[in-house]
Image (tube, rainbow, N blue to C red):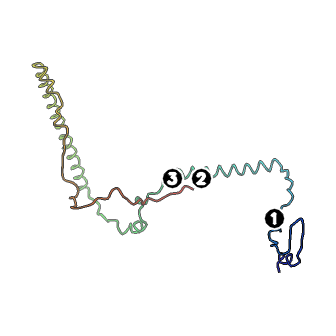
Amino acid sequence: MSLLAAFARLGLQSSRTGIVPGVAVSRCLHISPVLCAEPLKKKKKLDPQIIKQREDRKKKKIEKQIRRLEKNARQLKPVEELEVPLELIDEKDKRQRKLTPLGNAELEERALLKKQWAHYKHEERVADFQIIDRLVQAQNKALAELRSESEELYQAAIEVDPQLLPVTVKGPVATPPIKNYDSPDGDYLHQSMKWEVK
């Protein structure tokens, strides 16, 4: 039997609480919350030396974390595409080619070929520069002669031809175009790894 039912059965009446027989007692009872408090403790007076030691410990801990972060800051983030897979490192001895060492005659012949090739390319470059110099000198001489004849013709000769500037050149591409190909409108799947700094 509950407390409220007991009050109702007894028919208690109080002017202060307003309990009347037959009236629901639940409206009349008020319960205050339980307060589990205890008196405040006195603050202990700590030795200044102990306080200083605690602050020094905190300071050293923070400095250690800063040093660790600075040490890790120099390390670059690993790029997975540039890392060699472990199975390839394990198979390095199997994959390495065993080449026969070249003889002295072969090495001398290759060195001589390299020298001849370098000499040929140098002469070709010098010849190209000489041709360009001759053409520029001939052009300047012709322009000087034209200027002495007529200033108007000279100005017309050095004018930029607007017909030559809008040049459109269409050449072979790397792969032939695919017929009826509907190209995607800039969608791509972002697969780069996320790295968290600790």
* Mark 2 vs mark 3, CA separation in Å: 12 Å
Q: How many marks?
A: 3
Determine whether the residue tagged by mark 1 lies in a helix, strand or loop.
loop
Disc 2 or 3, which lies upstream in sequence?
2
* Mark 1 vs mark 3, CA separation in Å: 59 Å
Residue wearing tag 2: 68
Residue occupying image coordinates x 83% and y 49%: 47
Q: Amino acid at mark 3?
A: Gln
Report the front residue among 62 and 14: 14
Horizontal and vertical percent for residue 21?
85, 74
- Asked which quadrant contains residue 151, the reply is top left
Horizontal and vertical percent for residue 85?
41, 65
Determine whether the residue tagged by mark 3 lies in a helix, strand or loop.
loop
Residue occupying image coordinates x 33% and y 56%: 185
Residue wearing tag 3: 75
140 over 61 or under it: above or below: above
Quadrant in which the N terminus appears: bottom right
